[in-house]
Amino acid sequence: MASSNSESGNLMDEFEEAFQACLLSLTKQEPNTGTNKDEIELEVQKTTNRFIDVARQMEAFFLQKRFLVSTLKPDMLIKDENQDLRNEIARKEQLLNKHYSRLEEWKACLSDIQANQGAHNRPMGGIGSSIGAIGDSSVAAGAGIPGISGPSGLNISQGQNRPGAAGMLSNMSAYGVPRRY
């Protein structure tokens, strides 16, 4: 370990050297020079441990400096905390604004869907009369045709919440009901 009076410059240099050595040992590609796998693993382990030790020393150095600042100048610590809180509030306000804009988009989309469903769900005046014009009383009463509930028209409650409700209207032409959109 480095001595406790080591300067941050020396510690930073040691940290950088340990990092470079760790990367070199992990990325070096040697042709078959006679080194075996165990030697390479040992070198990687050794350089990694050195890097971790220097990182711990540097962390201890910064914690000591932070402690000194907090005891000698507590107002700086409070300023840092206030700035962190301001940044967090700004980030959360941006997130809220983003959610509000998405909520407005979804509300607009939902109102468009409801408006379109309202246009499709209106009773079509010609359906009941067209069915009656066929002359078959069972067809006019809606027997055997899903979605028809008697001579008044469509039974909207069966298909208004399904995405295939419009398809039900288009399939009615198979039963002799003309399409009127």
Image (cartoon, rainbow, N blue to C red):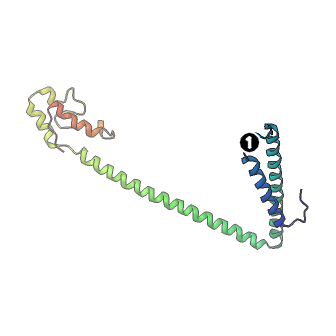
Q: Which image quadrant is residue 18 in? A: bottom right
Which quadrant would the C terminus be assigned to in this image? top left
Residue placed at 80% from the left, 66% from the top? 66
Residue in front for this viewpoint, 63 or 29: 29
Q: Which residue is mark 1?
A: 31
Q: Which image quadrant is residue 56 in? A: bottom right
Q: From what the image shows, is residue 75 above or below residue 56?
A: below
Q: Residues within 10 Å of mark 1 (few under 14, many from 20)?
A: few
Classify residue 120 as left or right of residue 26: left
Q: From what the image shows, is residue 132 above or below residue 112?
A: above
Any part of residue 157 in sight = no
Residue placed at 20% from the left, 27% from the top? 143
Residue placed at 16% from the left, 43% from the top? 180
Q: From what the image shows, is residue 22 above or below residue 160?
A: below
Classify residue 36 as left or right of residue 158: right
Q: Residue 71: horizontal and vertical position, in percent?
A: 83, 69
Which quadrant would the N terminus be assigned to in this image? bottom right
| Callout 1 amino acid | Pro
Any part of residue 71 in sight = yes
Q: Which image quadrant is residue 139 in? A: top left
Residue placed at 79% from the left, 58% from the top? 17
Residue in front for this viewpoint, 71 or 5: 5
